[in-house]
Image: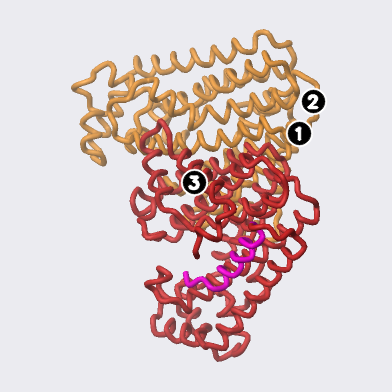
Chain colours: A red, B orange
Amino acid sequence: MQATSIYEPVKEGLERVEQNLLDVANLRFPFLAQVLAHVFESKGKRIRPAIALLASEFSEHDPEITEVMASGVELLHVASLIHDDTVDESDIRRGRATLSSLWGSNVAVQAGDYVFASAAAFMCDTGDIQVIRRFSKTIMALASGQLQEAADAHVLDQTRDHYLGRIYNKTASLFETASESGAILSGASEETVNAMCVYGRSLGLGFQIVDDILDFEGAEEVVGKPVGSDLANGVLTLPAIIAMERSPSDNPVRALFKEPGDDRRLAEAVAMVQDPAIIEESYEFARGLCHRSLECLKDLPRIPARDSLEEIVEYVLTRRK
Amino acid sequence: MQATSIYEPVKEGLERVEQNLLDVANLRFPFLAQVLAHVFESKGKRIRPAIALLASEFSEHDPEITEVMASGVELLHVASLIHDDTVDESDIRRGRATLSSLWGSNVAVQAGDYVFASAAAFMCDTGDIQVIRRFSKTIMALASGQLQEAADAHVLDQTRDHYLGRIYNKTASLFETASESGAILSGASEETVNAMCVYGRSLGLGFQIVDDILDFEGAEEVVGKPVGSDLANGVLTLPAIIAMERSPSDNPVRALFKEPGDDRRLAEAVAMVQDPAIIEESYEFARGLCHRSLECLKDLPRIPARDSLEEIVEYVLTRRK
């Protein structure tokens, strides 16, 4: 993503968000300061705070409040990554060693809790009860999504709707909160708030579906994890569900889930899902959702922030990692 | 504790808090419902929500709001226990198997996050920004306290002040939030809010010190964990700090921390700290704090809630587990 150009309308706001994140690590408690500095040195794409700030641009607003909210949104994302990595026992994230690999899962769980709480503190600083309440519902959704993934592992009978419910919780809920809160805090009309809510939700679903496609399609050196890692972990994502729809009985995924850990079966299952027709159908589904996001923008004034929100949709569909 | 009599003035409120907790587990997502049902079946002493409700009794108030807050306080306590057990790899808590021992640390971390978020949702339902903000600071304090304990492990040079700072974060911050929020939500005067704040903080510090004494003094079958488990984990608590003050150089604790895991050295260090004079000096310190709690109550009207708050102080000092 040419973040520099897409994020241009909120460039300065994003810089202040970055400073807010660094301030979280600026503590008198040296050990925690060191752990958190490690966390924030690894910069993500900052797509969620960018959406939050862009969504607020359609009405006059106090930028400090929206930046505080955008900081809370990114911190919640960072906190959930820390706990996910701990749970998955991942050693690397965004090219850097994870907290649990450096300091043990003990420290990673508690540091994640601390970042969750910092996120909540930022949300409180918006002073908007509606935004704060939405935020606490989002933490519940994120945790449910991860737990659903654990509960659904190696389960073969999963519909697209079931999958969508899970990735709404796991991913789209936070995108939705980012864009909707931006609109709410700028005092936008109810129509704009609703439009931003659907924009974020649809984009978040599309984002996760593309993520799940890249798990099959991407080269390991680009995506940063082995191809087919979801299937290897027993997680059925959209491409695999489509593959199961096409050949329900004699499907290598079925054989793999019966005997997880068998490398030959994994390779067969991955090869089946990599069928270009299946990948194309998955992208078609993601495009439909992203199209819905674009539709939400059509009644908004043509200001630079709207162009950026459109370009983010385009980016989500074309990204390679 | 004769909870039935001490809690009498807020008995019905506590029953509704209990129902609120059970409602958190009443979900359409069966796996999470099952996990949470297991969590809430194990009833604690509910001392924190009791204090929260009692502290609100000195002014006219909406009981529904204070019960919602008290539920959030207990949920935060439960969430932090879930994460502590995961981190400590404990198998048993309150006589029941821990989540991590039953479903793995994966599920325990995410279920803990879910309970944290439920706590935040209850706090939001109070609609009081001051209470919500205090709450997010408390989550940060709890996480810092646990991380400090990890950072301080096997460190010999620790002052009483350092220890008090750590146990304030780890334990007293939530007691303080419980009592102060009760006063705030009942619209009490600034003096009463301050009195309740100091009451909760001093009581929480006393509570943790007694806990730390019982780790040396209690019989394993009563306390539920091996005697000296803090020292075994490299955690220096007040009795051990006093022991170090008395003989700084030739102290078996020093030898133990140099060679953690050595059973003979552990036994020697525990025996040294169990010196009745050291235990008595530790209790004297806890009594001073508890006395401060009682002082906070002296200008409040003599209603049954005040008697209960006094009896809770007595209970904290005399409990055996």
Location of residue A186 with respect to B277 vertically, above or below:
below
Report helix, strand or loop for mark 2: loop
Q: Is residue A143 visible?
A: no
Q: Where is residue B244 in the image (x, y as percent from the top left)?
A: 28, 21
Q: Please give the chain letter of the residue carrying mark 3.
A: A
Residue at label 2? B61
Asked if the residue at tag 2 contacts the one at tag 1, i.e. Cβ–Cβ closer than 8 Å, the answer is yes
Give the camera-side residue of B169 and B75: B169
Pointer 1 indicates a residue of which chain? B
The reply to whether dot 2 and dot 3 touch (C-beta < 8 Å) is: no
* Dot 1 and dot 3 within a common chain: no
Q: Which residue is drawn at 64% across and 40% down?
A: A65
Range shown magenta: A305-321
Closer to us: mark 2 or mark 3? 3
Q: How crowded is mark 1: few (under 14 residues within 10 Å), some or many (20 or more)?
A: some
Is the residue at mark 2 from the same chain as the one at mark 3? no
Locate residue B15, reporting x and y percent. Answer: 74, 37
Q: What residue type is labelled 1?
A: Ile
The percent coordinates of residue A314 (x first, y second) are 59, 70
Report how far apart the C-alphas of labels 1 and 3 lie in the structure.
37 Å
- Contact, CB < 8 Å: mark 1 with mark 3? no
- Residue A18's disc number: 3
Side (left or right) of A119 relative to B282: right
